[in-house]
Amino acid sequence: MRIVIAEDDPLLREGVALLLRAEFLDVVATTDSPDAFLAAVDEHKPDVAIVDVRMPPTHTDEGIRAAVEARRRHPELAVLVLSAYVEQAFATELLGGGADRLGYLLKERVGRVEQFLDALHRVADGGTAIDPEVVAQLLTRTRSDSGLQRLTPRERDVLSLMAEGLGNSAIAERLVVTEGAVHKHIRNIFAKLDLAPTDRADRRVTAVLRYLEETQRHP
């Protein structure tokens, strides 16, 4: 796995690089600015980019915009975004381009090495990894007129874990239920969110994006 890191904090940048190299992963470049990051992606064509949301010069949204641009130039690039706290608008903007090969984690997860590496491998393998705290805050901000209000508490739990990027077996294990029960809950979620019975994987992504988009419209 070839990785480019974009982080302006030198301690965190080098710490993440050392952690990944200790796991025998190939960190091909570390950068501290959006322009340097995009140049590194163009040059090295990595499998995964790890990007801080807030980068120079204004430390607002340069990192997320660089990640969006990197995905535009290289659609197969997996991106794992790191943020100090939940940035709702940035999460929905990045996810709006498609949720596959995408992760959004709070920086505190880096210290939880197993969770961080699990998220990295998940996005590299084509999946999604959204921080549970991001999911929780987005769900609690959703207003009562949202279609999500049709969901039962258990269905909301299942949707939350879907948003984290977990598959059905992992959801079943987390909730201590059978996979058959998870399948039933997911079918109910699709029906209550009025999602057409097309490809199930596409509907999973659509279900996650639905509440992110609604939360963005109703902060």
Image: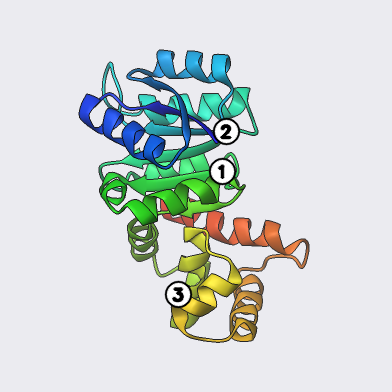
User: Which residue lies at the image location 58% right of the left edge and 86% below the top edge?
Assistant: 178
Which image quarter: residue 77? top right
Q: Amino acid at mark 1?
A: Ala
Mark 3 vs mark 2, foreground winner is 2
Q: Which residue is mark 2?
A: 47
Q: Position of residue 4 (x, y in %)?
A: 46, 27
Secondary-structure class at tag 3: helix
Work out whether mark 1 precedes mark 3 in sequence or the reverse, and give the earlier one.
1
User: Which residue lies at the image location 49% right of the left edge and 78% below the top edge?
Assistant: 173
Give yes or no for contact between labels 3 and 2 (Cβ–Cβ under 8 Å).
no
Q: Position of residue 83 (x, y in %)?
A: 31, 41
Q: Residues within 10 Å of mark 1 (few under 14, many from 20)?
A: many
Q: CA distance from mark 3 to mark 2?
A: 31 Å
Q: Quadrant of the N terminus?
A: top right
Q: Which residue is mark 1?
A: 124
User: Which residue lies at the image location 53% right of the left edge and 71% below the top edge?
Assistant: 170
Q: Residues within 10 Å of mark 2 (few under 14, many from 20)?
A: many
Q: CA distance from mark 2 to mark 1?
A: 7 Å
Q: Position of residue 70 (x, y in %)?
A: 54, 25
Q: Which residue is mark 3?
A: 157
50 vs 104, nearest the viewer? 50
Work out whether mark 3 precedes mark 2 in sequence or the reverse, and give the earlier one.
2
Q: Position of residue 171 (x, y in %)?
A: 52, 73
Is residue 219 something one can see in this rendering?
no
